[in-house]
Amino acid sequence: MAGKFQLDGSMIPRTVRRMFDQRSEPRQPIEQGTAVLTARRADHVVPLVNLSPNGAMIRCTAPLNIGESISLQMLDRDVIQGQVRWIRDGRVGIGFARPLE
């Protein structure tokens, strides 16, 4: 299947904070946005923390695993497929399968 995700070094849990911002694109903070995260056939309403064309940060207490495939439905957008890239302190980084338009 085209676009299949693979585990890579950017998805390894970190115990030490990064000293430099290694982001390849700016993030837009979200004031009070929510989305519906679907993982393992269960829906979870989650707060959006920030958003970029290629991913999002959410707050989530659902049991997720790094590398797990998910979908995210945001207001006024189509459902987008993604993958859990990192998990830390109740926050989850999602990488999108395709950039947002």
Image: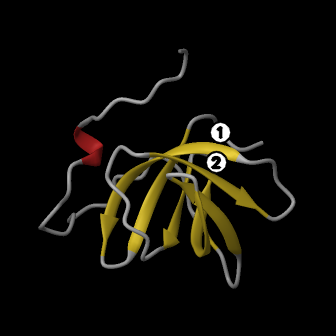
Residue 32's disc is none
Determine crowd level at label 1: few under 14, some 14-19, many 20+ residues with C-alpha closer than 10 A.
Answer: few
From this view, report whether residue 4 is shown above or below residue 56: above
Q: Quadrant of residue 34?
A: bottom right
Position of residue 101 measured from the top left corner of the image (x, y, whole percent): 78, 42
Q: Residue pushed farthest front?
A: 41
- Earlier sequence position, callout 1 versus callout 2: 2
Q: Residue pushed farthest right?
A: 76
Say which amino acid is labelled 1. Pro
Query: Do residues under tags 1 and 2 come within 8 Å of each other at their CB atoms?
Result: yes
Horizontal side, residue 49 vs residue 72: left or right: left
Position of residue 17 measured from the top left corner of the image (x, y, whole percent): 19, 69
Between 34 and 40, which is closer to the camera in this rendering?
40
From this view, report whether residue 67 is shown above or below residue 72: above
Residue ID at (71%, 77%): 33
Say which amino acid is labelled 2. Pro
- The residue singled out by tag 2 in the image is 53
Between 2 and 49, which is closer to the camera in this rendering?
2
Q: Residue pushed farthest top?
A: 1
Position of residue 53 measured from the top left corner of the image (x, y, whole percent): 64, 48
Residue ID at (41%, 52%): 23
Position of residue 12 measured from the top left corner of the image (x, y, whole percent): 21, 49
Label 1 to label 2, Cα distance in Å?
5 Å
Element class at badge 2: loop
Residue 99's disc is 1
Q: Residue pushed farthest bottom?
A: 32
Residue ID at (87%, 60%): 76
Element class at badge 1: loop
